[in-house]
Amino acid sequence: MILLSLFCVFLIKKKFGLYSVELIVLFVFFLYGFSFEIDHYLFGMRELGIPGLTSLEYDSSTYDIIKLLYLSFIVGYTAVIMGGKSMIRSSVNRYNRIFHNILLMSWSVSLFYLATNLYGLHRLEKISYIAGVKYFHYFAMIGCFYSVGVLWVYTTAGTLNNLEKLLLAMVLFYGLMDGGREIFMYVFLGLLPYLKKNQRALLMLVLTVLIGVMLSLWKPLTAAISAGVKWDELYNLVILQGQFSFSGLDPKPSLLLLSEYINGSELFSGMKGSYVFNMLGQIGSAFGLIDYTSLARTIMTRVDQTAAAGGSGLAFSGILESMLNFSIFGPFLLGIILATAIRLSRSNMNVNMLYIYISIIALKLVRTELMVVLKLYILPILVCVALFALKKNNKHEIR
């Protein structure tokens, strides 16, 4: 199964190139599904486990089923995406400069304010603080998404002005203080056109690997610093004592939740048809009509009430949620739907920035339930798409 999946990865890499959204989305899903197998071959790992969930054995039929589910996603995704064109059209736009500059300054100040207030806080303290300023934070996140679109456009056919550079600097500063990896992944997506057309391919590949290593160590590093670990102790704590594994980067909770579902766990009782009832629940909760929590938070409460009450969360799985709605056909259908969305948005790049933003949603779906992704991202994306759509287009081809 891993060989067939790698063959699909090779086909998409050959058609769209190494620095393409099509390949990155597929590779992330591949890594989530087959990380345990890679860890087994490289590091001899035979078992995955976290407190509160049943462990997963490498030689078990359960993991074979999990790999088959991810393979069905990969096949569905590849079958559709290979029909797309390997060229897109991007847009260089003429701004309403005053309005544009006001937005850039407002977002930059907001991100700087949030970053300085996050400095020195522990992870759960950061979650609590952001929850207390959620609308202000939401406005700042629109600036993060907008900066990715600006970076994408101007790395294809232009340069950044000083205020745009300031916004990007504040986005990175916020990412450093936030302690997560998502901001850096978004910036990396924005740089894809530059990486794609740059002639120093080997240098770019080495840089990409270094960025990947940095992101894999970022969470434990920031957690250790927040806990007050001294600099001279960080190397021993994170590097020497840390046991690196691909499944440990992020896929482990998703794999274990899939294992629980396959083995008939009661954790998922009442969650069938989540694409509908979760949407209604999230909307009702947003307007204060009902008390509703996400699927991941509900599962966390069932696994460990004490940890859930303290603000701890548990990553979910897009593959799992597709099965909650479409049974064994879910992963295959999810692959088709995501590939179709990317193809359609790619063909309309000369009109809007949907291509890069749908790609962000696709990457988030690998570990997050659909409605949480839409709730957190749909408004910023719609605002950014509207802002880009208001501008005059000067088409520029990227090959």
Image: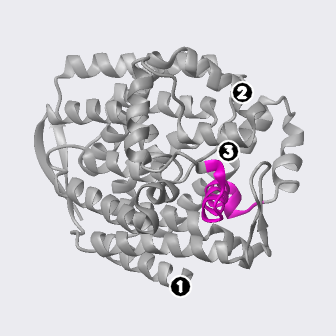
Residues rendered magenta in the picture: 244-267
Determine whether label 2 and label 1 are within 8 Å by CB. Answer: no
What amino acid is labelled 2 in the image? Ala
- Say whether marks 3 and 1 touch (CB < 8 Å): no
Q: Does residue 198 show up?
A: no
| Residue 118 sits above or below residue 267 on the image | above
Q: Nearer the viewer, residue 127 or 20?
A: 127
- Callout 1, which amino acid? Leu
Q: Which mark is residue 309?
A: 2
**SS at mark 2 in the image:** helix
Give above or below for 35 relative to 304: below
Q: Is residue 41 magenta?
A: no
Q: Name the residue under label 3.
A: 218
Question: Where does the N terminus fall, quadrant-wise?
Answer: bottom right
What mark, if any, has residue 74 been given in the picture?
none
Callout 1: 10 Å neighbours few (<14), some, many (20+)?
few
Q: Is residue 196 above or below residue 361?
A: below
